[in-house]
Amino acid sequence: MSEIESTVLSSLRDARLPCAFAFRIADENGWTPAQVGAEADRLDVRISRCQLGLFGYDSFRQKGFVQRFAAVPGDVTVSLRAVEVDEGIACAALWRIAEEHGLPRVAIACAAETIGLRITPCQLGCF
């Protein structure tokens, strides 16, 4: 068993790998998030609790909890539009924008949803 395989398997919660755990083990071991995501995929392990709130939240009786806001602050909209590509925005870009604005990642995902941006690609390769 490889080190990445055993690390992924030992990090499972309820037979799934939470997104935050995937990023933590990538950081702690010098792997990229994409490598951890690919290993999870190879092991047929599902990623859960997306840090953008897009999927993996069974307690919400739905895939995720991203919803539309009534309005998005202009400075957040400007930041999102600045990195938009073909009406989409990368997960990594949303993380950077959340940090720049001092907002939770899920709030930035909701803002992207509100202005009609498709979120892709995922840093772990989920979508």
Image: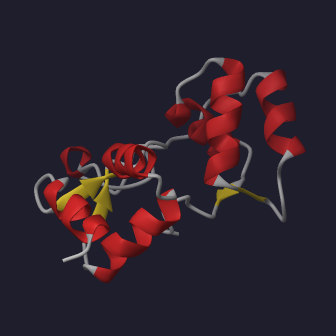
Instruction: State which quarter of the image contains the N terminus.
Output: bottom left
The answer to whether 32 is drawn above or below residue 60 in the figure is below
Residue positioned 58% across, 38% down in the render: 110
- Residue 11 at x, y percent in the picture: 19, 53
- Please state if 81 lies on the left or on the right of 5 as rendered: right
Residue positioned 89% across, 42% down in the render: 82
The answer to whether 85 is drawn above or below residue 43 in the figure is above
- Residue 95 at x, y percent in the picture: 61, 39
Outermost residue, top direction?
102
| Number of dots carrying numbers | 0
The answer to whether 41 is drawn above or below residue 58 in the figure is below
- Please state if 11 lies on the left or on the right of 23 as rendered: left
- Residue 56 at x, y percent in the picture: 31, 55
How is the protein colored in the picture?
A: secondary structure
User: Looking at the rendering, which quadrant does residue 77 occupy?
Assistant: top right
Residue positioned 15% across, 57% down in the render: 10
- Please state if 110 lies on the left or on the right of 77 as rendered: left
Residue positioned 42% across, 74% down in the render: 38
User: Looking at the rendering, which quadrant does residue 97 occupy?
Assistant: top right
- Residue 25 at x, y percent in the picture: 35, 49
